[in-house]
Image: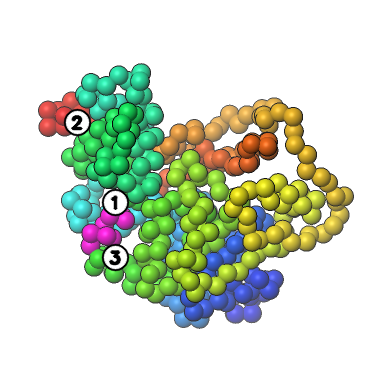
Amino acid sequence: MQRENILDGLNPAQLDAVVHTGGPLLVMAGAGSGKTRVLTRRIAYAIEQGQSPFEILAITFTNKAANEMKQRVQALIGPVANKMWVSTFHSACVRILRREAAGLGFPSSFTIYDQADSRRLTGYVIRDLGLDQKRFAPRAMQGAISAAKNEGLGPERYADQAAAGFERKVADVYLEYQRRLTQAGAMDFDDLLLNTAHLFRKHPDVLGHYRRRFTMLLVDEYQDTNSVQNELVLGLAAEHRSVTVVGDNDQGVYGFRGADVRNILQFEDAFPDTTVVLLEQNYRSSQTILDAASAVMSTTSAASRRTCGPTPAWARPSSVSRPTTRSTKPSSWPTNWPGSHDRGVPTGGATWRSSTAPTPSRVPRSTSCGWASPTRWSVAPASTIARRSRTPSAT
């Protein structure tokens, strides 16, 4: 496809983002503003200009979104798009760790524990440490361990910072839980990120290899990254600085999983020469809906520089009113949820979102109950975990 076709149909702000060269790029994009079009056309344009597709790493938050992105780029430039890495953070980390696991003392065929496996192992640890499982429930303890890993805290660092009481017990369980994981040659879902970050810190030569391997880095939904994911992005892009992040600080949905909206708000602190492009033209909603959304979100503490741009004015203006109840429960709930709001990996890949009603003391936030898992994982069966936990060497 010729350049004119790649750039066809873009509004001025989208065009600026697609053709940008020469440094970090931050695209603040609201819902319905065409951010996927910008990402795919930016990739296609870069390849047309000589960028090797083999050296492109594009990160999204679901496998479905990754496949869609690759298909759209392929429609623009052909099968050469298959040479790119387009995946979730976790899938990309699995690929890296399969190759580099020996540097951390793991076999390349390490097992990945899913949420149920991790919680079950946590229960065995709690039992073997003689703790009351009613006071220290496996679900709560596993959630605390997951939160620590999402903040980049290994068991030793967490133990050093733990206060008395519950945190102290979490530290004890975390240390033994991680010891058993390592002994079994296994990682849980959160370890995929944490161990990759640890690998890059421990082996600068490995980090250097992947910096040279991926000379163009693009990350979607950056407002949903946690501290470990942010560290990975900044580390990989530190030298070549060819990094594009796209997001909207008003749309964070992974706070329960450690997402930190400050990562996108402070991106310019990490890269002072960042070019910022605001996608303010909404192609999805009427102006009535946009005005109402802007009025609600203007009450948040982290105000966005982005505003909702004009759309066809075919609807009458409306005002934002506060409901008298906190509940906005629909009349019928989905019957095929992919998982629950627990930390970890649900069995499905679909995402369901809901928002709580705005009240004077609560800002509405979206929540998600699931995300896609990396493909072709080796997951340990429950019987294997139980057997390992009963062996003398595991206790």
Residue at image coords 27%, 60%: 201
Q: Is residue 30 left or right of residue 379?
A: right
Res 211 visible: yes
199 falls in the magenta region: yes
Asked whether the beta carbons under mark 1 and mark 3 sit within 8 Å of each other, the answer is no
Magenta segment, which residues? 196-203
**Image quadrant containing the N terminus:** bottom right
Residue 156 at x, y percent in the picture: 24, 43
Label 3 environment density (alpha carbons within 10 Å; few <14, some 14–19, many ≥20): some
The disc placed on residue 207 is 3
The disc placed on residue 195 is 1
Name the amino acid type tagged 2: Arg
User: SS for tag 3?
Assistant: helix
- Which of the two discs, 1 and 2, labels the residue nearer the N terminus? 1
Name the amino acid type tagged 3: Leu
- Which of the two discs, 2 and 3, labels the residue nearer the N terminus? 3
